[in-house]
Image (cartoon, rainbow, N blue to C red):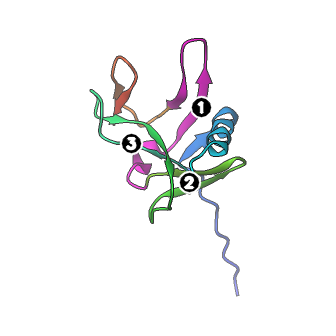
Amino acid sequence: MTETKIRQRPAAVNLTPTAEQRIADLMEQAPEGAIGVRLSTPRRGCSGLAYSVDYVTQEQAFDEKIETPGGVFYIDGASVLYLIGSTMDWQEDDFTAGFVFQNPNAKGACGCGESFTV
């Protein structure tokens, strides 16, 4: 009998080491009952979609699950198609701190960088 090899599917979003560390930091201070953090793309902003990272208390059936050294990172199942091939980073400077996304699917973004369109 021929053995079938199943190829591991790459994650929809690549996390930089600083993003993974930020997830670990968030999980250290997570509210009771949080099992991870979830990235979603709710309709918001002047370009239509925004990135949102929130604590999650239960898995959803179609969420993508990424195990990181500091905790579980989920991608909202309805958002995966907008995010495939993206890189998520955490950046801090003297004035701001936040997750930064390089999304090859984004066709445009608003002037303030808070929302994007596909």
Which residue corresponds to mark 2?
A: 34
Residue occupied by mark 3: 41
Of callouts 2 and 1, the N-terminal one: 2
Furthest-right residue in this view: 69
Q: Is residue 26 left or right of residue 100?
A: right
Q: Which amino acid, mark 2?
A: Ala
Q: Could you tell which of marks 3 and 1 lies nearer the N-terminus?
A: 3
Q: Is residue 4 magenta?
A: no
Tell me the magenta residue range: 77-101
Q: Nearer the viewer, residue 65 or 87?
A: 65
- Which one is closest to the eye, mark 2 or mark 1? 2
The residue under label 1 is: 89
Are the two marked residues, 3 and 2, in contact with CB atoms closer than 8 angstroms?
A: no
Secondary element type, mark 2? loop
The amino acid marked with disc number 1 is Asp
Q: Position of residue 41 (x, y in %)?
A: 39, 42
Query: Disc 1 on helix, strand or loop?
Result: strand
Horizontal side of residue 64 vs 17, given as left or right: left
Quarter of the figure with the N terminus: bottom right
Q: Position of residue 99 (x, y in %)?
A: 54, 31
Does the magenta-highlighted stretch encompass residue 78?
A: yes
Between the residue at mark 2 and the residue at mark 1, the CA separation in whole angstroms equals 22 Å
**Cα distance in 3D space between marks 3 and 2:** 20 Å
Residue furthest out toward the bottom? 1
Residue 53 image point, x, y percent: 48, 41
Looking at the rendered image, the quarter that the C terminus falls into is top left
